[in-house]
Image (spheres, coloured by chain):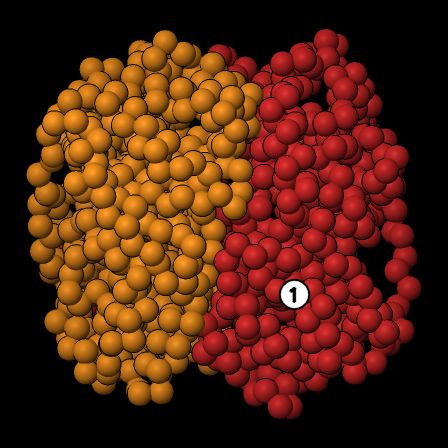
Chain colours: A red, B orange
Amino acid sequence: MRSLWAILLVATAAGAQAGVTDVTLDNGMRVIVQADHRAPVMVSQVWYRAGSIDEFNGTTGVAHVLEHMMFKGTKDVPAGEFSKRIAAAGGRENAFTSRDHTAYFQQMQKDRLELSMKLEADRMANLVISDESFAKEIQVVMEERRLRTDDQPQAVTYERLMATAYQTHPYRRPIIGWMNDLQSMTAQDARDWYDRWYAPNNATLVVAGDVQSDEVVALAKRYFGPIPARPLPARKPQIEVEQIGDKRIVVKAPAKLPYLLMAWHAPVLRDWQTDTEPYALQILAGVLSGNDSARLQKSLVKTRQIAVDASAGYDGVARGPGLFMIDATPATGQTVAALEKAVRAEIARIQAEGVSAAELARVKAQVIAADVYQRDSLFYQAMQLGEYAIAGLPPEALAQRVEKLRAVTAEQVRDAARKWLIDDRLSVAELDPQPIQQPMRPAAGTGDSHVR
Amino acid sequence: MSVKRFLAGLALCLPFAAHAALTLQHWQTPQGARVLFVENHALPMLDIAVGFPAGSARDPAGKPGLATLTHRLLDQGAGGLSDTEIAHRLADVGAVLSGSFDRDRAGASLRTLSSDAEKNAALDVFARVLQKPDFPAAVVAREKKRLIAGIREAEADPGSVADKAFYRALYGAQPYAHDPSGEPAAIETLARADLAAFYRAHYNAPNAVIALIGDVDRAEAERIAARIAAGLPAGKALPPLPKASAAAPETLRIAHASAQSHVLVGTVGVARNDPDFFPLYVGNYVLGGGGFDSRLMHEVRDKRGYAYSAYSYFMPMGEAGPFQLGLQTRTDQTDAALKVAVDTLRAFVADGPTDAELAQAKANLTGGFPLRIDSNRKILEYLSLIGFYRLPLDYLDTWTAKVDAVDVAAVKAAFARKLDPDRLTTVVVGAGAR
């Protein structure tokens, strides 16, 4: 551990958060800059604090639909022109919508940041959503839903489990939206969403790369500064009702293998300085499945061979309430019920006996190393800054993350498992595979005539 | 002949343009392993990738799945360490071992901190995994089951079903035809001895490409590469794969309980070393490689809302890899979407790109070049690629110039040579089938 610690010191001194600039413009827009001069490139991301968490029933998916519409043009930059100009400058661009946010990004050579800001500022204020372009794009979004959810049995299982684990909190709704809501959505729904949330005082600009922070801030002032702040709707807490007993669903979908997905309600990071449980839960996930022979893999996949895959996951950075999750695929001839029992036995073992010093040290070594490795990716660095900002956590929380994880004790890990991984907080989904039509070989020799 | 002299004789140093500070160095070990190295001390870490011509195209007749199973077993017991000891020793020092596998190549990569204790522990495990896999019989049995489960699971995914059918139809008897994961019936019959024999024949020094980037100096990189190569089995360079020839045009419709049809259209395309590569690559940006900047995306998605994704690409491989055009759409509009895509392809092959389109493609590709080498991970990929496919060592230096040299006539001529719209293979996987 000694030499790892030395590395950490070097890493902290050399870079990452030491170089973070975090300012707020007069109109309320936040600007975060991470200088990294390894390569002559930069990534620029505009994050809006508007995700599916902010949606209402009947218009689920509108945050993501608006993301698509943001590429459909403004008064000055006609449809398709945004992408064309970025591409002409050698850029890569796209956008992503999550439960907590919608974000837009460009990756370009460092001297092209101004173009990116100019275009982003324009569509923050001047988007045009025509009925015609909406009618086409909503079809694209429905195809995206079919591709990513409807035809993916494990994704369907996940979607249904979320709708079960959360009863009152908006996290119960899929980011892509329910199909019926997409079918019923109108251009006006998208316009309303844009008018409600696309304001500088609901946005954070994150720029990482070979840039000077004062120049980035000056450009941001020039392009985003003139956009006036607007009052934002009050956000209601919508706290999830306390779970009072385990919940179980069966999902029947065309599939070949069964699948088990378990989710326990768990806390997320709110006060990053005093909270300890989110850090302990992250270490717990590492103990369970942080390497190819961590507890779940070693016990379920390798030794007992009751599963062909098993993993644990936990994300402690979010606007809404968290979940600790475990998923696993049973081995041939094994049932989901038997697999669930085996998973529970592993959890019970940690609750009874705790984790070993070697396991704890192993997970921490991985955390420390991963903190170095992630600096190889500019995009990932910017992503982390954006996610923390959206979750209401300061850059210092990110800077101190490794320290906080290093401070976690074996007792804290055991206690977190005892407190949070209990049946009354648990929702379980079982994928029950339904037949897939057998491939049918068509008549030979038809050539490709029908495609012309 | 001393190792030092040998190294000096073959050493080459080439700076690449976007990174004045970084230099590609190349040498060969006495056993014949090719080494590519970039010294970069910006981060306290080291990446190593070792690749072999041991992909699924090397599966022996009747044993589809042997190559991937062998590759999977490398880190599941080696040099006297159990699978668990390997995983724990690496995790204990924060090292990450990962594998890559496709039709041409099988590889293993190590990412480690560059501090001595961590690096040495990680390299010790990495060397065992590459040099002394044990293929324990019980673990072989377990991994066979897991591999087969993965294949079964993929049978539920219409995209995977389409992909398998596409390669099968395109390549017929050539070894690119079968899926890299192999066939369950054949996998059932594989034994430890099959894996050991496959390993000895393919994972040897004359076939190895060792790529390194990170926080070590040249002398240390030489020591690391020498240590890896020296412990590999003796052997000789493998012969090239059988040539791929164009398949007869064919349309396959496969029933599947899915909301969308997955449509793949294509033909046998080009090998890595094909002189048409750059005109095809740049031209394809306009056709279907440029994302929102491409004709396919514009026609299929923007104008008609038929699909979320519509694309085309040439995948250059050791032998001629495929040209593939793909989209996924609601089953009841499959034929309409397919027609739009193929009409777009026909028009492009017939007329080529406009001057403006080609200028846009070149501007994006050359202007975006620095993004291709902005991380150690991306550079490592290029080092492996250059080594494996024996691309010129100045590949990255001349890349933008080669893109810039492409003109409309070159694109038209290259597409005319390589892509006949009347001889396409079409695969449709979806509910209707018919």
Closer to the camera in the image, B395 or B312: B395
Q: Amino acid at mark 1?
A: Gln
User: As drawn, is B224 to the left or to the right of B176?
Assistant: right
Question: x, y (%) of residue B49?
Answer: 35, 37
Task: Give the left or right position of residue B397, taking residue B178 as reference.
Answer: right
Of residue B38 and residue A191, the one placed in the foreground of this image is B38
Give neighbour class at mark 1: few <14, some 14-19, many 20+ (Cα, 10 Å).
some
Expressed as whole percent of the image width and height from the top left, the position of residue B233 reads 19, 21
- The structure residue drawn at horizontal position 70% and vertical position 31%, both measured from the top left corner, is A282
Quadrant of the image containing the N terminus of chain A: top right
Q: Identify which residue is drawn at 21% across, 39% down.
A: B8
Position of the C terminus of chain A by quadrant: bottom left
Q: Which x, y percent locates residue A276?
A: 82, 30
* Secondary structure found at label 1: loop
Parent chain of label 1? A
Residue at left offset 63%, top offset 14%: A358
User: Visible in this render: residue A220?
Assistant: no
The residue that mark 1 highlights is: A212
